[in-house]
Amino acid sequence: GAVVSQHPSWVICKSGTSVKIECRSLDFQATTMFWYRQFPKQSLMLMATSNEGSKATYEQGVEKDKFLINHASLTLSTLTVTSAHPEDSSFYICSAEGLAGASYEQYFGPGTRLTVT
Amino acid sequence: EDQVTQSPEALRLQEGESSSLNCSYTVSGLRGLFWYRQDPGKGPEFLFTLYSAGEEKEKERLKATLTKKESFLHITAPKPEDSATYLCAVNNFNKFYFGSGTKLNVKP
């Protein structure tokens, strides 16, 4: 079935540095990829939507210059957290939307735990 | 405004005690309603997609149903391994809206 991978699964970085997270759809081509953020005991918060070859659409309140999204191909999207600060520490999850039969389904990656010290 | 509300927030069941989780939604147009299971520290795992009122889908001990205003996730004779947070989401042809989830705890 449809598999989405994320790398790394966890990362610790120092304040002020940048971190890149990769999201790959392994066995299907993703028309659209999504990036979410999840705080402890809370639901998913959509950060941005990206389509291959075009600029990402950011949700209200999400800083596009801080969270850089690149959707290089139909199987790869990256999220770069620039000049990370402790408040950026969170669980980041990507998802990919792909055609499953006659309909589109959304499949999630395993998530990346970011800790900024 | 499009939104999704899940209830209850938390549910504790004894093993074998069947119950239902609710997902109420208001949306301008429904492309699909999705159920996911999420274990702590992991990404959501896809369970079902429902597209129209009256549709039902089953998988092992889980059965999802859909009306024009809400969806239910029925859990029959749950086991401890069914313990997780269950998320509901709707797609209005533009974006996904997630509920806050129901945390299910099944005790042996």
Image (cartoon, rainbow, N blue to C red):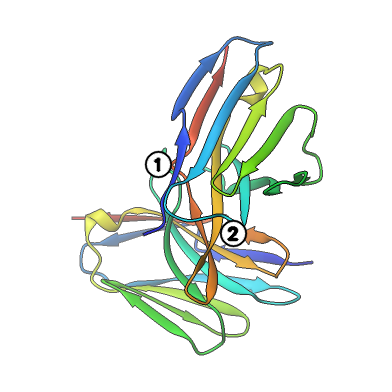
**Visible in this render: residue A40?**
no
User: Which mark sits nearer the N-terminus, 1 or 2?
Assistant: 1
The amino acid pointed to by label 2 is Gly
Q: Nearer the viewer, residue A92 or B103?
A: A92
Task: Give a yes or no on whether discs 1 and 2 share a subunit.
Answer: yes
B89 on left or right of B39: right
Q: Secondary structure at mark 2?
A: loop
Residue highlighted by disc 2? B99
Rendering coords of residue B94 (x, y %): 73, 64
Tell which residue pokes out farthest to the bottom in this image: B54
Q: Amino acid at mark 1?
A: Pro
Disc 1 to disc 2, C-alpha distance:
17 Å
Which label number is shown at residue B94? none
- Looking at the rendered image, the quarter that the C terminus of chain B falls into is bottom left
SS class, disc 1:
loop
Q: Is residue A36 above or below residue A67?
A: below
Front residue of A69 and B68: A69
- Tell me which residue sits at (71%, 31%) in the image: A67
> Residue A104: horizontal and vertical position, in percent?
55, 68
Q: Quadrant of the N terminus of chain B?
A: bottom right
| Callout 1: chain | B
* Residue drawn at the location 49% of the way across and 55% of the way down: A107
> Disc 1 marks which residue?
B40
